[in-house]
Structure formats: C-alpha cells, structure tokens
Image (spheres, rainbow, N blue to C red):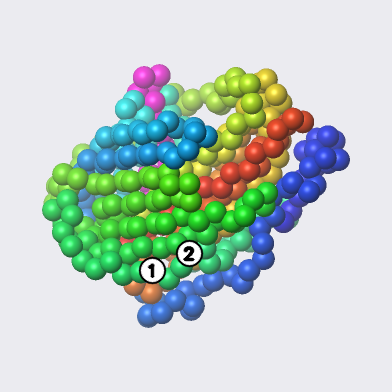
C-alpha cells in the first residue's frame, strides 16, 4: 500500500507497523451466482417510518463501551430515498439525490455536511498519494435461514462469516446474521458477533408504510450554522475509536447510499495520531478518503455504493476500514465492519 512519512519520527520507527492489506484477487459480480440485475432508472422507494432499536453487549474486561448499552431511535424514509435518523439530540439526514450526509446537533444548532463522489458503476482509481483501497472477498457465501415474519413484515434470513484483515494480529472474524424485507426495502434486523463474543443488534419495529414523511424532515432547519472542527479529548493512553462501527448502508435501486466512518485517537497528552489507514471492500462497495492528511488525530473515509449490477434483490456486501494510531509510546490497530444492503 502507499506509505507516508508523516513526521521524521514515524519514518524511522513505524515502517514495520504500517497497515498492509494482503493481496487477493478482486471480486466482481461475475463471481456471484445468478443473473446480474442493473440499477439504472428511478424505481419506486417505499416511504416509511419505524422505531430503530440498537443493543450492544461487550465481552471481556477490555471492552470500551461497557457491558451493555441500548438505544431507541426514530427512522424516516421518503419516496426519493432520503432517510432521517433521530438519536437523542443528533439527527442524521442522508440524501442520495444530492449525494450528501448531514448531521444536526439539536442542542448547539450546528450541522456538518459530507458530500459523496459522483455516482458511477465503476470504482474510481485511488490517487497515487491516497490511502490504499482494495476490492476483494471478505465474506463467506450466504447461508439461507429461510423466511418468517418479523416486526409485522415478511423477511428472509441469511448468515455470513466475515473475515477482517489485521496487520499486527491474526485476521478477525465476525458472524453476521441479516433479516431483509424486499417488500418494504428494509434491513429489519442485523446481528453481528465478533470473536470475543461482543454483540451488536439493530432491529426496526413499529414499521409504518404508505405515508410520505414531511419534506422538511430532510432539510437543514433555518438558524443552524456549520460546526467547527472537532477537538480531540484528553486521555492518558493512545486510544483508537471508530464511529460509527458497524457502518450500515442501504441502497434502493437508483438511490445509492453513501456514509462516512471516522477513526479517532488522542493528540493532546501523548501526541497520538492516525499514522496510516486502509480500506477493504466487496463489490459493489467502494471507499474514498475524505480527510486530506495522515498524521492528525482523526481520519475520515466515505463508503459508498458504486451502483453496479447485483445478482439478486436483497444483496449484501461487506467492507472494513483499518486505522493505525501511533505515539512514541503506544501503537493501536483497529478495523471496522461495513455492511451494504442492496434492494433493486
């Protein structure tokens, strides 16, 4: 992968620790069984609203999020494919028409905006100085779990074993189970278990369809201002956190999803920086760096659906971003999980 000399100290001491993605043949749609289904034109997106339930349970004493955590959020989607998540005082609006993701802070009345690259069926080549992006197989073939009713809708279940590469440790595995409703174009339940036993579950309940949400739910309210850059918080170690993790994307035909994921470390007490980063994705996912420079306390990736044809409705693809946090006294490597659901 492309390796950068951020500071002179990194150049002399970090060469052996920079993230390296093992080589493997890229995977395209021709390696999947079934007839590819194109995603051109403007097909119908089912408008809906629902309650989003998220639960996390961590295993072991080293977990950073506590033994258990639960969230209850609101979710809206209109017929243009625009979505709105309400989580506490934070609102996230994704507009595939404009190619933007907006985050509102209702307490400070501030917003941040991320813009996706132009839609294309072909993944763009990364620039010579950009962090490395590789497209290859990360998951097993889906294991069929059958059909059932869940949250009032018909769903089809599949499970996958996802192998995430790591440079300073053996590859990590995640067991991912998904229950998808092609009728309402929704990933009704996603369950992820890592090798430590830590679990993540997202479930949609109270699913209401057929009513178009108000248009102003998907715009920045008047009186909001652009947020200032985030300043790293103090810490006595060299931590590394990824947010959001897992990152879940959903595309509906022509409405292609794009969302960002950021690795954070501490730069106040110990001089920690993101020394290197890389992304690995399965077709039709791709990733592009949003941040311009390494050697800072954070680095942001944008993961997006390239819009290439898929073999069947309810297709699932996986990805991962790896981050290396470094200081003269600490080095931490961490990889995320990214899941793309495609409804055609």
> Given contact means CB atoms under 8 Å apart, are the residues at marks 2 and 1 in contact?
yes
- Residue 97 lies in magenta, yes or no? yes
Quadrant position of the N terminus in the picture: bottom right
Question: Foreground residue, 245 or 236?
Answer: 236
Q: Residue 217's x, y, as percent? A: 27, 36
- Residue 182 in sight: no
> Which residue is disc 1 drawn over?
142
Looking at the rendered image, the quarter that the C terminus falls into is bottom left
Q: Find residue 189 and report its horizontal and vertical position in percent.
A: 28, 52
Q: Secondary structure at mark 1?
A: loop
Query: Viewer-proximal residue, 152 or 122?
Result: 152
Give the magenta part as a residue range. 94-109
* Residue drawn where x is 57% and y is 64% of the image: 135
> Can residue 141 be seen in this snapshot?
yes
Seen in the picture, residue 255 relative to 100 is either above or below; the reply is below
Residue 330 versus residue 38 in the image, above or below: above
Q: Find residue 250 and name its label.
A: none
Find residue 243 and report its horizontal and vertical position in percent.
Answer: 49, 38
Q: Which residue is mark 2?
A: 139
**Helix, strand or loop at mark 2:** loop
Residue 342 forms part of the magenta stretch: no
Q: Residue at x 68, y 30 (%)?
A: 272
Residue occupying the point 32% across, 58% down: 178
User: For this view, does 302 lie left or right of residue 223?
Assistant: right
Asked whether 127 or 245 is in front, the reply is 245
* Relative image position of residue 16 (x, y in whole percent): 78, 48
Q: What is the crowding at mark 2: few (fewer than 14 residues within 10 Å), some, or many (at least 20)? A: many
Q: Report the residue at 43% width, 44% height from top.
A: 198
């Amino acid at each position: 992968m492309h390796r950068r000399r951020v500071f002179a100290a990194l150049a002399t001491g970090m060469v052996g620790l920079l993230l390296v993605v093992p080589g493997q043949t890229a995977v395209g749609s021709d390696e999947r069984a079934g007839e590819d289904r194109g995603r051109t034109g403007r097909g119908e997106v089912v408008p809906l609203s629902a309650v989003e339930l998220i639960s996390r349970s961590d295993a072991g004493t080293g977990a950073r999020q506590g033994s258990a955590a639960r969230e209850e959020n609101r979710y809206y989607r209109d017929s243009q494919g625009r979505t709105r998540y309400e989580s506490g005082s934070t609102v996230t609006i994704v507009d595939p028409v404009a190619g933007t993701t907006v985050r509102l802070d209702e307490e400070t009345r501030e917003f941040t905006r991320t813009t996706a690259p132009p839609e294309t069926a072909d993944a763009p080549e990364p620039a010579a100085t950009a962090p490395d992006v590789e497209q290859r197989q990360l998951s097993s073939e889906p294991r069929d779990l059958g059909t059932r009713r869940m949250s009032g809708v018909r769903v089809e279940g599949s499970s996958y074993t996802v192998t995430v590469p790591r440079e300073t440790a053996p590859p990590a595995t995640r067991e991912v189970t998904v229950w998808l409703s092609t009728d309402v174009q929704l990933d009704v339940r996603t369950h992820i278990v890592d090798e430590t036993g830590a679990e993540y579950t997202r479930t949609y309940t109270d699913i209401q369809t057929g009513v178009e949400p108000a248009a102003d739910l998907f715009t920045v309210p008047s009186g909001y201002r652009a947020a200032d850059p985030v300043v790293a918080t103090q810490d006595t170690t060299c931590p590394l956190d990824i947010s959001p993790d897992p990152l879940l994307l959903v595309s509906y035909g022509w409405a292609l999803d794009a969302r960002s994921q950021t690795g954070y470390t501490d730069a106040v007490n110990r001089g920690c920086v993101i020394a290197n980063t890389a992304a690995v994705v399965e077709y039709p996912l791709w990733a592009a760096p949003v941040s311009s420079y390494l050697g800072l306390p954070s680095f942001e990736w944008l993961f997006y659906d390239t819009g290439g044809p898929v073999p069947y409705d309810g297709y699932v693809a996986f990805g991962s971003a790896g981050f290396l946090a470094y200081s003269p006294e600490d080095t931490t490597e961490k990889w995320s999980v990214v899941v793309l659901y495609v409804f055609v």
